[in-house]
Amino acid sequence: QVQLVESGGGSVQAGGSLRLSCARSGFTYTNYYMAWFRQAPGKEREGVAAIYSMYGSTYYADSVKGRFTISQDNAKNMLYLQMNSLKPEDTAMYYCAAQTYGGTWYVEKNYNYWGQGTQVTVSS
């Protein structure tokens, strides 16, 4: 059974940094996307960043390019999101997700595994 568990969320002032972590277990796939999504109150869930297992290719939403970095440590079964220069508009629940279908990375319905989320709050 695949499990994804996020941690590392919290409250920070604008301009600060946070590092989110996602621990995965029961995951035996070799060809997959791992991603971070976020959902702010009253808004739809959106793709923030993703990494493709085969080549380590990374993908980012325009709103976070240059500020966020996605990475993974396969030996530790961990996914990370380093978030720098945080803005109040980054406030949201952040979710770790995995998909094995090879679909477009930012499309929520392509993901078949989800974590429970971790809250990030950025104050001005």
Image (cartoon, rainbow, N blue to C red):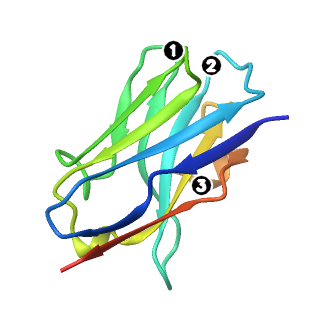
In terms of depth relative to the viewer, which is nearer, 105 or 76? 76
Q: How many marks?
A: 3
Q: Amino acid at mark 1?
A: Met
Residue assigned mark 3: 108
Q: Is residue 22 left or right of residue 58?
A: right
Where's the C terminus, which quadrant?
A: bottom left
- Work out how far the residue at label 1 is from the one at label 2, CA to CA, in angstroms: 6 Å
Q: Amino acid at mark 2?
A: Asn
Q: Position of residue 40 (x, y in %)?
A: 45, 75
**Is residue 97 in sight in this rendering?**
yes
**Is residue 104 in sight in this rendering?**
no
Q: Residue 54: which numbered mark, if any?
A: 1
- Dot 1 or dot 2: first in sequence order is 2
- Dot 1 or dot 3: first in sequence order is 1
Residue in view at x 33 percent, y 51 percent: 61
Density class for disc 1 (Cα within 10 Å; few <14, some 14-19, many ≥20) is few
- Dot 3 or dot 2: first in sequence order is 2
Q: Residue 31: which numbered mark, if any?
A: 2
Residue in view at x 66 percent, y 51 percent: 115
